[in-house]
Structures are given as C-alpha cells and as structure tokens.
Image: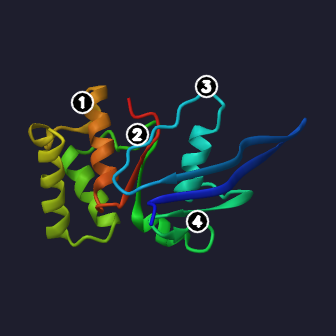
Amino acid sequence: MPIISTSGLARTFASKTGPVEAVRSLDMTVATGEIVGLLGPNGAGKTTTLRMLTTLLAPTGGAATVAGRDLVEDPAGVREKCGYVAQSGGVDPHISVREELVTQGRLYRLGKTAAVARASELADELGLTELLDRRTITLSGGQRRRLDIAMGLTHRPAVLFLDEPT
C-alpha cells in the first residue's frame, strides 16, 4: 500500500475575478520509504497540496489517502499518521528548546516522562542537545529549523511533510 495516494486531487479558490485553480487534478503515488519533492514556481500549488494532504485545507475535488487513511473520511486519522513542518516555524520565542519539545510531546498526549525522553531523543538525533536549555529566540535560523523538524517528528509519524525545508 502506498504511503500517499492521490487521484484527481484539486483545490479551487473563489476570487473577485472568478475561480482560481490552485491544484488541478493531481494524481500521485508515493511508496513507503520514498522521498519526494514538489518542485515548481511560486503559485504552482505546492503548499496548497501539502496543506490538503495534512488536512489543514479541504480539497474541492478528487480523493487522497495518507498512511492508509482517507483525507476526507478520516482527517483525524491522517493527522495522527503525519507530521507537518510549515514554511515558517511556530516556536515560542520565550521558552527553552527543552520546554518546546516537551510541550509538543504533551500536545501529542505523551505522558510527562515519555515527553521528556522523546525530547532528549530528538535533541540527540538532530544535534540540539547542547541547545536544550537555550531560549528558542537565541537560536540561529538553521538551529530553529532543526527544532521545527524535531517538533514534526515528536509523535513518530508515518510520513513527514516539509514545506520549504531549506
């Protein structure tokens, strides 16, 4: 079974001048373990596609599954199975890296002990260990991006979506 499958996935927005097709009939199959990049100019629908696949935006047409969960019929199941790292991070600038990671774990319903352990594990994996007690506002852009990725991996998602990861 593919980790992501779309058939005719579409999103149309209403505008003052008429409908705008942001994504038009996208057919895509991504196998488990595969790394896929969506390339195209600004306005090509890349972010709109990711927002649909992560249930942040409802499609106006077509069908899709993520990790075996139907986008429209089981949006909570999709969210459970995927991580999402947006273009611009969403960290609290006034708390430490450790607090941010533990809070993220708690939001994913990890117990306090499990959230602390997961924060340490992610810090080790992403080179954030020496930064755990620093406030996030003091991080460089690259360090902040690694923190964003760690937060997207907190609940061990089956698929991770990175919007503008560089």
Q: Amino acid at mark 2?
A: Gly
- The residue located at (18%, 51%) in the rendering is 122
Q: Secondary structure at mark 4?
A: loop
Which numbered disc flags the more N-terminal residue, 3 or 1? 3
At label 4, the amino acid type is Leu
> Nearer the N terminus, badge 1 or badge 4?
4
Q: Tell us which disc is closer to us: 4 or 2.
A: 4
Q: What x and y, as percent, mark residue 60? A: 74, 57
Q: Position of residue 77 (x, y in %)?
A: 47, 72
The numbered mark at residue 89 is: 2
Mark 1 residue crowding within 10 angstroms, few (<14) / some (14–19) / many (20+): some
Horizontally, residue 90 falls left or right of residue 102, namely right
Q: Is residue 27 above or below residue 109?
A: above
Q: Mark 3 or 2 closer to N-term?
A: 3
Decide if residue 39 is on the left or right side of residue 152: right
* Mark 4 and mark 2: Cα distance apart in space: 24 Å
Choose between 50 and 87: the one closer to the eye: 50
- Mark 4 burial class by Cα count in 10 Å: few <14, some 14-19, many 20+: many
Label disc, if present, on residue 71 of the rendered structure: 4
Q: Residue at x 66, y 31 (%)?
A: 43
Q: Amino acid at mark 3?
A: Pro
Q: Which one is closest to the eye, mark 3 or mark 1?
A: 3
Task: Give the x, y percent position of residue 14.
Answer: 83, 45
Q: Nearer the viewer, mark 2 or mark 1?
A: 2
Q: Which residue is mark 1?
A: 138
